[in-house]
Amino acid sequence: MTTLTRREFAAAAGASAAAFAAPAVAQGKGGRIVVVGGGFGGASAAKYAKMFGGAAVEVTLIEPNKTFYTCPFSNLVLGGLLEIGAIGHGFDAMRKHGVKVVHDMVTGVDHAKKTVTTAGGASIGWDKLILSPGIDFQWGKIKGYDAAAAEKIPHAWKAGPQTVLLRKQLEAMEDGGVVVLAPPANPFRCPPGPYERASMIAHYLKTTKPKSKVLIVDSKDKFSKMPLFMEGWKKVYGPMIEFIPQKKDGPVTEVDVANNTVITEFGAKHKGAVVNLIPPQKAGKVADIAGVTSKSGWAPVDRRTFASTMQKDVYVIGDASIASPMPKSGFSASSQGKVVAAGAVDSLGGKAVADPSFANTCYSLVAPEYGISVAKVYAWQGGKLVGVKGSGGVSPKGAPASFRAEEARYARGWYASIAADIWG
Amino acid sequence: MKQLYGPAVAGLAAAALIALAPAGAAAESSGRNLALSCFSCHGPAGKSPDTIPGIAGKSAAFIAQEMIAFRDGKRKSSVMMRIGKGYTDAEIKALAGYISGLK
């Protein structure tokens, strides 16, 4: 297969630069927009806010990491199809577009003074604050699983060092080993992600350690694109992937780190040569710091504008927000980031904020040449954010190999395009 | 990005919009909001860097015609048939107008 290299990403970045020759809305009143989080939501918001706002709008992006590693396509790193560098994105292009990029950690938000403070001691003023903090883990919700345990039993649900750790464990595993993969109950980041992961790990095992298997110990009974994954697994991997639903063993409640074992509510113990536990999640810490999360752990928003329902002039986008019916996906976050940036700029300029339109397309690879997808278009109708009736849905079941191959090719095209759209 | 959308589109989306802003501005942001999602697959400003066909440099009429063909099942595709069903004729014209106006 064609793998995406750093060089190809650089080329993609160059291709997009021309689009930003002139701002779309340069006239009128401006102001200061601060965006926190350089992932799919935040980086999209920062780039498009600058593009729409032009010189009148000062845009600052605060992100602790100099390189952002994407969760999308991190499963391809686990499967050995890509190197970790291929899913890392820097912020040089963002600076070239005129966004001020600050690599620091937000430690405080003062809503009265409209400032954010950082670990590095900076105080940055804003007129509109866009938060895209992603997720954090509910450590301790699964007994025995905390940040220290994750160094032995990786979650790999934030890409980067955790992805590399899990990949190394897979490489070190002997043929005949069992990889235990334990996905969480809903809601969580990237609903089809754990199942693409099972596929990509199975692909690696099939091609290098064919006596091994993947055991999915799930904390729910059904998952995204389930019939399509099941069809694909049967076809490509036969009995190599086994799925245990929650109704059989109960949800995963405990982990025995010393014995590489997950334990379920009904007392079942599943030991793996490698264990990948994806713990329950909540909005990223910055959302808590900013006081925009409800008891649910996620951030409630007005789904027309993505303005926080808890703080004025603050928007929350991406996985951290309660954006239902939109899924917690990178595509959703980017779609929200662009529309919210436009709304924030229009609002600063004293213009009416237009109704939103969003979309989501999530590709998953069952195998390198076997892709499947789910899509939906979202609109503001009757005072609600709804999935447009009749739009979207999943790839057809029983489709020919050529259809699956085209979707695999488009999955790679999607990654290159969205990366260029956001970080290019 | 100097002209955001063609005159043919100006009146179309306005009817559906709130009366707070001048009709032209409202229609402009409507076409823009509709079109922004397209770039996630078709690349920034519709310029695709990889396997998905680009949509930059196409006329509004062509984009609208193709979108309607996908939506109505007259043109087959793996995913655009599903995406196309999310938009009305007026919305398709508004987003096509915005995209064709990008540089």
Image (spheres, rainbow, N blue to C red):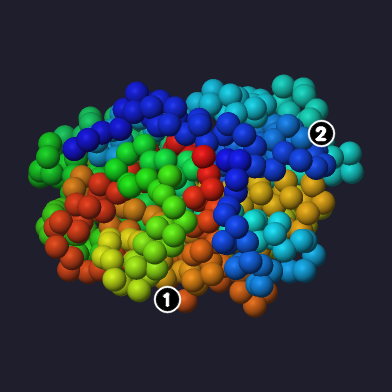
Looking at the image, residue A315 sits to the left or right of residue A332; the answer is: right
| Relative image position of residue B1 (x, y in whole percent) | 58, 40
| Relative image position of residue A153 (x, y in whole percent) | 38, 39
For the view shown, which residue lies furthest in the front direction?
B7
**Which quadrant is the N terminus of chain A positioned in?**
top left
Say which mark, if any, is on residue A21: none
- Residue topped by disc 2: A125
Looking at the image, residue A168 sits to the left or right of residue A309; the answer is: left
Q: Amino acid at mark 1?
A: Gly
Q: CA distance from mark 1 to mark 2?
A: 44 Å
| Relative image position of residue B100 (x, y in whole percent) | 49, 50
- Looking at the picture, tell me which residue is in the foreground, B30 or A347: B30
Please give the name of the residue rendered at 23% of the width and 30% of the height, measured from the top-left corner: A172
Q: Earlier in the sequence, mark 1 or mark 2?
A: 2
- Residue topped by disc 1: A390
Looking at the image, residue A222 sits to the left or right of residue A340; the answer is: left
Circle 1: is it few (<14), some (14-19), or many (20+) Cα within 10 Å? some
Residue A181 seen by the camera:
no
Please give the name of the residue rendered at 81% of the width and 33% of the height, measured from the top-left corner: A125
Circle 2: is it few (<14), some (14-19), or many (20+) Cα within 10 Å? some
Q: Amino acid at mark 2?
A: Gly
Q: Is residue A316 above or below residue A87?
A: below
Looking at the image, residue A396 sits to the left or right of residue A107; the answer is: left
Please give the name of the residue rendered at 80% of the width and 42% of the height, measured from the top-left corner: A28
Q: Output the chain of dot 2.
A: A
